Amino acid sequence: MKLKLGLALMATTILGTAFAATAEDVTISIESWRSEDLSIWQDKIIPAFEASHPGIKVKFTPTAPGEYNAALNSKLEGGVAGDLITCRPFDQSLGIYEKGQLADLTDLDAMKNFADVAKSAWSTDDGAHTFCVPMASVIHGFIYNKDAFKELGLEVPQTEDEFFAVLDKIKADGNYIPMAMGTHDEWESNTMGYYNIGSNYWKGEEGRLAIINGTQKLTDKPWVDAFKSLAKWGAYLGDGYEAQTYPDSQNLFTLGRAAIYPAGSWEISGFNAQADFEMGAFKPPVPVAGQDCYISDHTDIGMGMNAASKHPAETKEFLNWVGSPEFASLYSNALPGFFSLSNEPVTLEDPLAQEFVSWRKDCHSTIRPTYQILSRGTPNLETEMGNASANVIKGTETPEAAAARLQKGLASWYAPQQN
Amino acid sequence: MQNAERKPRFKWHILVFLAPAVLVYTAIMIIPIFDTLRMSFFADVDNNQVFVGWQNFKMLFGDERWADHFWNALKNNSWFFMIHMLVQNPVGIMLAAILSSPKLRFAAAYRTVVIVPAILSFVIVGFAWKLILSPLWGIAPWLLDSVGLKSLFAPWLGKEEYALTTLSLISVWQFIGIPMLLIYAALLSIPEEVLEAGECDGLTGFSAFWKIKLPLILPSIGIISILTFVGNFNAFDLIYAAQGALAGPNYSTDILGTFMYRTFFGNQLQLGDVNMGATIASAMFGIILVGVCLYLFAIQRRLRRYQF
């Protein structure tokens, strides 16, 4: 009973402070799913803004990533959402904008600092209205343990054959788990797995747009071949990877127990703080030696204004600052791995982040294939992608069957795929 | 009673005393239930709510994009309920029978230990068990290893064939104290004379439990069964805390509650659909209503009660 009382007290304290914060007059608050960044916002970014903008206090109030969309929608419906909304790319934010819950920011001064392609993730389909200030993109690849590679005498793989040869060697040695990934949370399987290696198969934008306009199907060779490659991963994951969650994978790698981590660049700052070994990164290996390489350089995060904000002037002031070169440099360096989308070039200090961003020079950039338009219907393609990728890795569904199921689901509501 | 000869007046105090309960109950239960039922007959067309009759229900039960998930969730939910009926309640009764034995020492301590998990939050239970069973950091693989049975270990929460049963048993572990307490109270209320009379006729020990005590606690078992039924078909928290809204692996632990949550509030890129969410909630309401009615008319009325 004591415990229960303690919990109740804790709950009231948390609720109490939350209410107190919204009651404050000059305070604007930020909704975000980046709970890992709490200290960076509180210690670096917000103080920098508050120093140059007296009279405005900013509060960063993140939700867990998995619950963010649901929580945000409910908060917006209930009229209790914060003034600033961190925007997911494409339909999630577009949907909120169309409901009139996000303000139109097309005329915001800071928008001139961004190219159309940067704004595309937060613009209406015709590009006429933009509703979020682009903040950053994330790049997919693999982070590896340099010490482990040195110890085993391994070279960074360029092609897929080399990639699996490296994994075989790590497995044969037995000291390290070859690759840290689990299928428990499902989204890991497609985000870090399928989209990561897949863009080399479907040739980035070419394949992505072909699915959108209906000239390719998910059952076509490139899409199935990517699943076939992914199907080989299961053998290289740790014992009991079926029950391994995303935080488990992160810990497994940063504790030095796994050699390779299929990553998104957003991991960099967390890993820098956790790992006490040297880390390197390599881009997704190409299936055929010498072919062009494609990377997933995903417009991931933007910031918009709650249309129901009680402090629109202050909120816009903050957004203008978010669009400024000052913020771009501050943010990209405080959070290495989130690469600014601003036209202004930003100098990065983190070597791992430099490695990731250097691929932009050699490879073609694309974004995750399901994010634009294709996840508007039921069944939801993004959710099904995670489910199918996890099944393929576990071997409970063949690549062909998974692709056929995804195609059937997409064709059931998406007209361009119905012929 | 000095005013007994007066004309009976309208008894305002009854209304006054009923009002708080009626108002609160109406505000937080009755209105939301009817509003949910109402929402399940509407659909969102260009951000406007339009009346569509039974279409949502037809889709939920008939359109394979929804029906596959619905029947899967219903099947899983039934299995979840079965495990509770087959494990939680019999074991609960057994524990109560042992506890009520006058020869048992430290009965109060055991009682407390068994009831403690029931007062823990789902989040704590889900997280603790996830850690215990974790193939990476859990103590379950380590314990099995220390007795040389590591080969029996599997990542139970990550395997389609085990995950739901594992979670059901975790839920049983958490709530076993509730049937135990109810049965325990029922057992204590059986008068000594009845048992002594049985003893004179030669009924002792196990046969006394079987022939005297069990019939006398049947009404309590009925109540427990129906509470389990309602609780299980409303369950959500444990699955959500342990497996997340997708109720993986591959929807194998998806029950009606998680299916409803995912649909209503959305998930990742999937936007929330309040109307289909409300439709699932209405279906859950219907299932529970039918189950409770069946129980009340078919079983409750036939249960014999004994007065001492």
Image (tube, coloured by chain):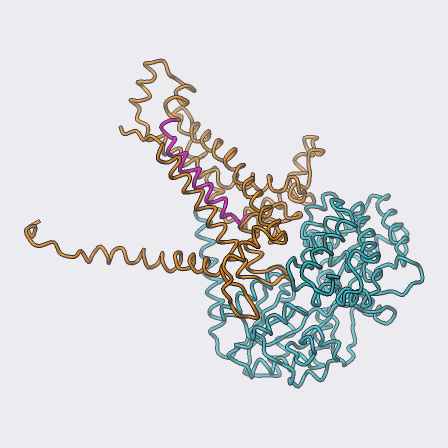
Chain colours: A cyan, B orange
Residue A96, x across and y down, in percent? 59, 71
Q: Main secondary structure of the magenta part?
A: helix
Quadrant placement of the C terminus of chain B: top left
Residue A36, x across and y down, in percent? 65, 63
Magenta residue check for B235: yes
| Residue B112, placed above or below residue A22 | above
Residue A58 sits in quarter? bottom right
| Residue A92, placed above or below residue B10 | below
Magenta extent:
B215-238
Residue visible at 33% across and 28% down?
Answer: B190
Magenta residue check for A23: no
Q: Residue furthest front?
A: A419
In this image, A161 relative to A123: left or right?
Answer: right
In this image, B275 relative to A376: left or right?
Answer: left
In the depicted view, which residue is nearer to us: A407 or A390?
Answer: A407
Residue B45, x across and y down, in percent? 56, 68
Residue A111 sits in quarter? bottom right
Residue A105, x across and y down, in percent? 63, 81
In the depicted view, which residue is nearer to us: A297 or B251?
Answer: B251
Residue visible at 35% across and 28% down?
Answer: B216
In the depicted view, which residue is nearer to us: A4 or B204?
Answer: B204
Residue visible at 43% across and 20% down?
Answer: B206
